[in-house]
Amino acid sequence: MPKPDLLCLVQLLDGTIETFRVSKQDEGVVLLDLVCDHLRLQERQLFSLQIRESSTAIASITANTHSPRWLEPEKPLKKQIKGLVSPFYLNFRVRFFISDPNSLQDEQTRHLYFLQIRSDIREGRLQCPLSAAVVLASYAVQSLTVHQMSGYTDVCCWLCCSVWMDAQCLLPTSAAEMGDHCPSWLPGYLSKWHFIPEQDEDFLSKVEDLHPQHKGLKKSDAELCFLNTARTLELYGVELHAATDTNNAPLMVGLASSGVAIFCNMICSSFFPWGNIIKISFKRKRFDIHLKQKHGETQDCEMSLLLPCPKTCKNLWRSCVDHHCFFSSNRSPRSSRLKNTTLQSYRKLITQHLGLGNSKPESGPVCQRVVGGMVWNPVLRRSLSSEHLETKSLPSRSPPSTPNWRSPRVRHGIRKPRPSSMELTTDLKDMSEGEDVFYTYRASVSSSKTSEGQGSPQHISGDYNPATDDISLQADDSITDEDSLPQFNKGAPGDGDLMLICIAPDKEGKFGFNVKGGVDQKMPLAISHVKPDSPADRSDPKLMEGDLVVLINGRDISEHTHDQVVMFIRASRESHTRQLTLLIRRKGPGRGTSLLHSLPTLTLNIQPQEEKPRSPGPSERPPTLEESMRQLERGIQTGSLCFHFENLYRRKPGLTLSCARIPENVEKNRYRDILPYDTTRVVLQGKEDYINASHITVAPPVSGVCLRYIAAQGPLPQTFTHFWQTVWEQQTHTIIMLTTLTERGRTKCHQYWPHPPETKDYGPMRVKCHSEECNLAYVTRQFTLTHTELGEERAVTHLQYVAWPDHGVPDDPSDFLLFISSVRERRKGEEPLMVHCSAGIGRTGVLITMETALSQLDQGQPVSPLDIVKTLRDQRAMMVQTTCQFQFVCEAILRVYKEKQERAAAP
């Protein structure tokens, strides 16, 4: 064993310095493992060691900020310390910042994230607006225990800085256990604390004002709130490297989870997603980024930058490679190819997804497996009716080696847009929420030509022997004898079929469809849009909106994230066939028909099963509340309720959207496909009368209650004035916001209000924010809205729900039900509530449906969620956007009813 002859001093994130001894012959990973073992870290892949070029123990890492050099795990230490004298100094730091800190599994990892971000803000490495810095500092103070507040006395304390004093004199010893504010503390109790580079008394005064609002928040929760606020910063998780362009203008190169950004004067001027980068190379001081062809161009693009020296250029190149490898490997294992003649692929397809190959008694299922978010139960009636496709929640875990990106609860954080993380291509900006990717993979110049957009179904023949559990299959693309196959493609495929679709990209590498869903979004993967005359539209059978994706190139995607699915589809373009093969399930009755027909000699051993009761359709109303709840519960259990929802029209036939589509109004729509009906749109006074908002009125029968809403999209910068004009003209005193400003790096809503205690003008409307109170589920703000031309003012309450995860629905409806209660308390007669999310249809529809149902429950009237959704869609298209949202609200209604019953039965 090599002699440990190298002394390494590692500064940890709490400021302490630890000593480790290793051999010069050891690889870097040996030292990194020693440090991680010392800290008892579980999520080690997120951390690394940064090499100090200075050999002084108290050297700041600021010198390394614009050219960070990281320890290479696979390289011997002796090759990495050339020119450095003993001892060898390093800094232990977070290397990779994931976009959602809530998904970090270990509390220790979250604590280290917290320590680094706090230090980076304090020392100026992470820029932070003053308003956000106040919030962050208040959480930082709340996170301190009395021991931390009184026990640290030097540079190793939690807020180490160049000038420090004994922290024991800062706070009284009577402080509460978890950093709670004590009323006996005098103003200025934070005067010696250091939070940001150039803080003043006014800043500290604001922190002291905000700190008491966090009373009772535990240390771990305060740190998580800190992280949820910090992740909205423009440069959160961005590793910066100094560079210049070819004209010697200074630039900064930022490496993030989604790609490479170029900053000019710390403003993001260009952004290149990893998927658009073909190659990254360097030669001496020149750093080159090779990009894919843009539409209409004949050759690849290249961007060149100059670094200060060859060493810094290599550092940047190495960091690019590391970031790309880390975030790509954690999102998308390489997709396996679907071989047309591979027996195993089709054996898996038939046995796992049609339930063949198992012979169980009639009393139990043949097999039950989650397929594309649906539980496929093959013990079906001969018709394979849809009642036996039970909608279930997708597994909350992620597949092996894949991080769990599910966000169980977003704590009360103040969110701001992240321009540097915005998608800068027009392909993505117009999609509605949930439709994340429009595939535009471009073929390389050397790619072989294929028939444009021509796809064909995969013809399969085979024999199945139930006695031996064996399947003999042959796949042949060249079958031409129609007599050897059933009448498979004589007409349109039946609604409800399982079918194979093969799609080849066009000359530009486009497949031409949108998808939404994934295990991280808690909804099955589905086709949300098919572009007309695209390869997907020209395939045979044709890919259709609403198709549920079961397999991609033979891979079961039921437990994969949305980003992984994106990479699987991308991988098919890179294969030698360049074909994408999808097994899809078409919604509707008769599931499995076409795939079964394509197996003419296959004998199915399907046992009949007792028919389950159906829940009522939209036109059937049960006579009593109790009966409606029984049918609601049965509908949830069998999945038939979701089946009826999926077959409900998304847009009411016969209603027009003309006003929203005229040229001067197009730019006022956040999404091109989410538009208000002409008959129910909100009409503003004056020349510009359009806003993407709809009047919604719900009057449950018999109850005598009339609930009025204005359902709107999240305001855009160019519609702030129209939004506040609507609030004034419709005389609403309550605004309900159901989204954060950014989600997964994309802007969902622009901030249309000032921070407290600021005042801001929006046309003739002046808004003053008086206060901002946070709890675990939502933020309450108090505004004064003044019409400057009329000289009149009104009080407006702003409720922002922040506990909804980035996509999908909350895991537990408790917080949402508390929020609904707060909304109902503020309702004044028939005054309309202004409700918006991002598009103004999904979460907005859920809230309106829920409040309507609660009103019916209070009156003892029967509740039919399908009827409510139908009523909403008659007034604004696509209200309650997804199946998982509908199921969530149904389960929440049932929960409230059962809790009422339990309280009534209690003595």
Image (cartoon, helix red, strand yellow):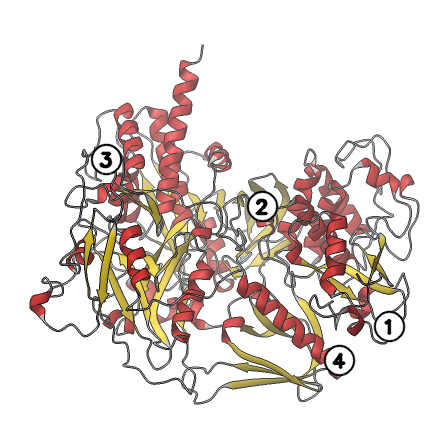
Residue 677 visible here? no
Identity, as a three-letter code, of the amino acid under mark 2: Phe
Distance between mark 3 and mark 4 Cα atoms: 69 Å
The residue labelled by disc 3 is 361
Badge nearest the viewer, 2 or 1: 1
Say which residue appears at 12% left-offset and 73% top-offset: 480
Distance between mark 1 and mark 4 Cα atoms: 15 Å
> In what element is the residue under mark 4?
helix
Asked whether, in this view, residue 229 is left or right of residue 438, the answer is: right
Badge nearest the viewer, 1 or 4: 1
Q: Nearer the viewer, residue 864 or 53?
A: 53
Q: Is residue 362 above or below residue 492?
A: above
The residue labelled by disc 4 is 311
The earlier-in-sequence mark between 1 and 4 is: 1
> Which x, y percent locates residue 531?
30, 69
Distance between mark 4 and mark 2 Cα atoms: 54 Å
Distance between mark 1 and mark 3 Cα atoms: 73 Å
The residue labelled by disc 1 is 84
The earlier-in-sequence mark between 3 and 4 is: 4
> In what element is the residue under mark 1?
loop
The residue labelled by disc 2 is 783
Dividing the picture into quadrants, the one containing residue 185 is top right
**Residues under numbered marks 2 and 1 in contact, where contact means CB atoms less than 8 Å apart:** no
Q: Nearer the viewer, residue 403 or 630?
A: 403
The earlier-in-sequence mark between 2 and 1 is: 1
Identity, as a three-letter code, of the amino acid under mark 4: Lys
Say which residue appears at 93% left-offset and 48% top-offset: 165
